[in-house]
């Protein structure tokens, strides 16, 4: 592993920001630290950077324990949430700042900055000041400034938080492409699930100072290991009693049953319905147009579920009685998540 955190603990007064944090990151990977506000993700990032010191445990980068190595000697580039550009410096001088601190030659600085300006797609804007740039352009400059000294590790603290939604979407793709092209190991903090899924090679979920789960976006989404991981992703509904929905394995000690919209299929009466004996009767209580789909809220077996229907499917109306088939649910026992598929999925018959 290129970056390792071993038994890291960090406390601020009575607040436990990091509680026995352990994980490793392979070289060249783009990792998303994902969690709600106060979950400890930014504290982890700042400890890796050397801006905070752990109370106990080891931070290892490229095989070397760096706990006692100052931030300036760790070979790390840091991109802040609010850009932190020098407003009285031009684009060129902002990017060159770290190189000047390193006392690089003027020729090297000029060539390196020109190379980076081309890389971030801001050619011709060398002499502009931050106030003359858009939010997306300022974030690209911050990215180039962090890369200028050729860091071994790049850290980004909610890099898209201060940017509007459309530009944020564009920058996600741009960042992933740049990181892949450069091959620099990178860790970014976010509370945006879609952002983490789209950009990261792997996701580390944080909650109350602990690591809940680590894996690829697909693994995290499809195979949550803990109750928190299961509830954190997607628009989840909770079943009052999942055993009322046929046909699922009974789990001893089950506490919560979690359902995502993609687990639910809504059928109008008269539509072809697979697994008829496992379907439940439901009543539509709300519909919402979501652009590319219709979101439907339905009450069934004492629970309120959210499902979707395509725009090309016959519409349903509020108050309409429908049939509800539940493909899957995630049942929790303590902090352990169990993924249950409807046993009727083994059937092959089609019943109208």
Image: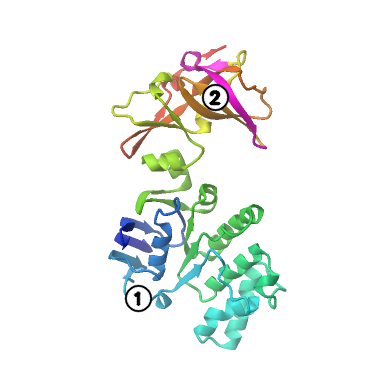
223 in magenta: no
- Is residue 262 found left or right of 206 in the rendered image? right
Task: Write down the residue under mark 2.
Answer: 298
| The image quarter in which residue 269 lies | top right
Please say if the residues under marks 1 and 2 sit with CB atoms less than 8 Å apart. Answer: no
Label 1 element class: loop
Q: Main secondary structure of the magenta part?
A: strand
Residue 144: % across, % down: 58, 71
Q: Nearer the viewer, mark 1 or mark 2?
A: 2
Q: From what the image shows, is residue 64 above or below residue 254?
A: below
| Residue that extends furthest to the front in the rendered view of this protein | 14
Q: From what the image shows, is residue 113 above or below residue 184?
A: below
The part of the chain drawn in magenta is 273-291
Residue 123: % across, % down: 70, 72
For the residue pair 243 and 299, the one nearer the viewer reads as: 299
Label 2 element class: strand
Residue 248: % across, % down: 39, 22
Residue 291: % across, % down: 67, 37
Task: Write down the residue under mark 1.
Answer: 69
Which residue is painted at 28% across and 65% down in the image? 55
């Amino acid at each position: 592993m290129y970056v390792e955190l071993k038994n890291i603990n960090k406390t601020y007064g009575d607040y436990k920001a990091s509680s026995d944090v352990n994980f490793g990151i392979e070289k060249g990977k783009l990792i998303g630290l994902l969690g709600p506000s106060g979950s400890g993700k930014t504290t982890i990032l700042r400890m890796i950077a050397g801006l905070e010191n752990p109370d106990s445990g080891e931070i290892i980068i490229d095989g070397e324990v760096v706990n006692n190595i100052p931030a300036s000697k760790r070979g790390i580039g840091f991109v802040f949430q609010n850009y932190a550009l020098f407003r009285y410096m031009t684009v060129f001088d902002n990017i060159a700042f770290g190189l000047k601190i390193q006392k690089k030659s003027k020729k090297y600085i000029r060539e390196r900055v020109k190379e980076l300006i081309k890389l971030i797609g801001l050619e011709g804007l060398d002499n502009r000041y931050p106030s003359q740039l858009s939010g997306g352009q300022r974030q690209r400059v911050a990215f180039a400034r962090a890369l200028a000294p050729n860091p071994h590790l790049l850290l980004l603290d909610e890099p898209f938080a201060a940017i509007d939604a459309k530009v944020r979407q564009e920058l996600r793709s741009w960042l992933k492409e740049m990181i892949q092209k450069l091959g620099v190991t990178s860790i970014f903090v976010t509370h945006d699930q879609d952002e983490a899924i789209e950009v990261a090679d792997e996701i580390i979920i944080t909650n109350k100072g602990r690591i809940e789960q680590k894996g690829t976006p697909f693994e995290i989404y499809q195979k949550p290991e803990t109750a928190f991981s299961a509830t954190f992703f997607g628009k989840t509904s909770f079943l009052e009693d999942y055993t009322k929905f046929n046909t699922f394995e009974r789990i001893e000690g089950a506490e919560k049953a979690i359902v995502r919209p993609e687990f639910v299929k809504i059928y109008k009466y008269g539509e072809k319905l697979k697994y008829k004996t496992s379907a439940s009767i439901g009543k539509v209580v709300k519909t919402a147009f979501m652009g590319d789909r219709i979101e439907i809220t339905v009450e069934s077996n004492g629970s309120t579920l959210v499902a979707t229907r395509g725009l090309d499917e016959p519409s349903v109306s509020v108050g309409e009685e429908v049939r509800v088939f539940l493909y899957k649910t995630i049942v929790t026992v303590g902090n352990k998540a169990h993924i249950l598929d409807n046993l009727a999925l083994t059937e092959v018959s089609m019943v109208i």
